[in-house]
């Protein structure tokens, strides 16, 4: 189940990357690069930091074809994308949760400490989007909008707690996935966010 969700997620993330590239008037090569980095950048960074070699997508070249093709397809479908906004939000939420759980699993299998496992999950979940926004010269969305990175953290914590309780692995996946989707959808619907720190030297004079 997680594999199919992962494939859907990297496709959706690739398309969101292509749209971001389009907003910056990038050429077709740039669109393909940003699509690929958005979809697979988080997992790549995780593997490099954890010393998990070879990097996962290098063993699955079909992921390259899928993400780049999704990015290029977005160019053709761009005029219809505004009608699919809600669908993309749901797919993005699915991607965030799926990437987080996958990242946690990778770190668990490598025998890392719990804190590192949670960090690996978050890196996998959010860093593709962070890299996309940095390359497109934007403040990363995960740092300024509704609850996003914090949802990834909570999903990771829930998943690890359920695993430690010895609950069936499939049930752990389903429960973590469902809770993560609900949290993200609620955050979008009610515009839930963490407190914002706004600093200006003038306000302290």
Image (cartoon, rainbow, N blue to C red):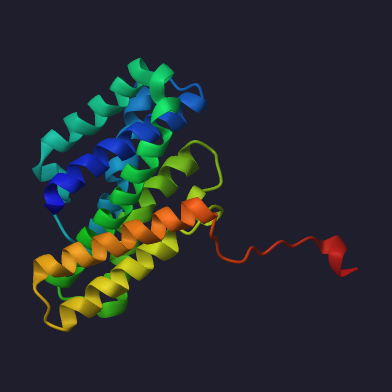
Residue 11, position in %: x, y?
25, 36
Q: What residue is rendered at 35% in x and 37% in y?
A: 87
Q: What residue is rendered at 31% in x and 43% in y?
A: 91
Picture layout, residue 160 above or below residue 88 = below
Q: Tell me, yes or no, if residue 130 can be seen here.
A: yes
- Image-quadrant location for residue 85: top left
In-image side of 30 versus 24 (left or right): left
For the residue pair 59 and 98, the one nearer the viewer reads as 98
Picture layout, residue 11 above or below residue 51 = above
Residue ranking furthest to the bottom: 165
Picture layout, residue 86 above or below residue 179 = above
Residue 13, position in %: x, y?
32, 40
For the residue pair 178 and 149, the one nearer the viewer reads as 178
Q: Tell me, yes or no, if residue 123 can be seen here.
A: no
Residue 142, position in %: x, y?
48, 53
- Image-quadrant location for residue 104: bottom left
For the residue pair 29 and 72, the one nearer the viewer reads as 72
For the residue pair 91 and 116, the one nearer the viewer reads as 91
């Amino acid at each position: 189940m997680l594999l199919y969700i992962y494939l859907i997620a990297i496709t959706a993330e690739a398309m969101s990357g292509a749209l971001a590239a389009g907003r910056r008037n990038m050429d077709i090569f740039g669109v393909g690069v940003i699509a690929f980095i958005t979809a697979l950048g988080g997992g790549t960074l995780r593997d490099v930091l954890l010393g998990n070699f070879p990097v996962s997508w290098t063993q699955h070249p079909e992921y390259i074809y899928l993400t780049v093709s999704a990015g290029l397809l977005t160019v053709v479908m761009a005029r219809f994308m505004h009608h699919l906004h809600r669908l993309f939000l749901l797919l993005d939420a699915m991607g965030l949760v799926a990437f987080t759980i996958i990242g946690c699993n990778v770190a668990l299998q490598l025998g890392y400490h719990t804190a590192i496992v949670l960090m690996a999950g978050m890196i996998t979940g959010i860093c593709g989007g962070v890299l996309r926004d940095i390359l497109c010269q934007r403040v990363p969305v995960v740092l300024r909008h509704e609850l996003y990175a914090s949802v990834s953290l909570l999903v990771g914590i829930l998943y690890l707690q359920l695993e430690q309780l010895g609950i069936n692995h499939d049930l752990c996946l389903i429960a973590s996935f469902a809770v993560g989707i609900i949290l993200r959808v609620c955050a979008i619907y009610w515009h839930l966010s963490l407190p914002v720190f706004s600093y200006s030297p003038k306000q302290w004079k």
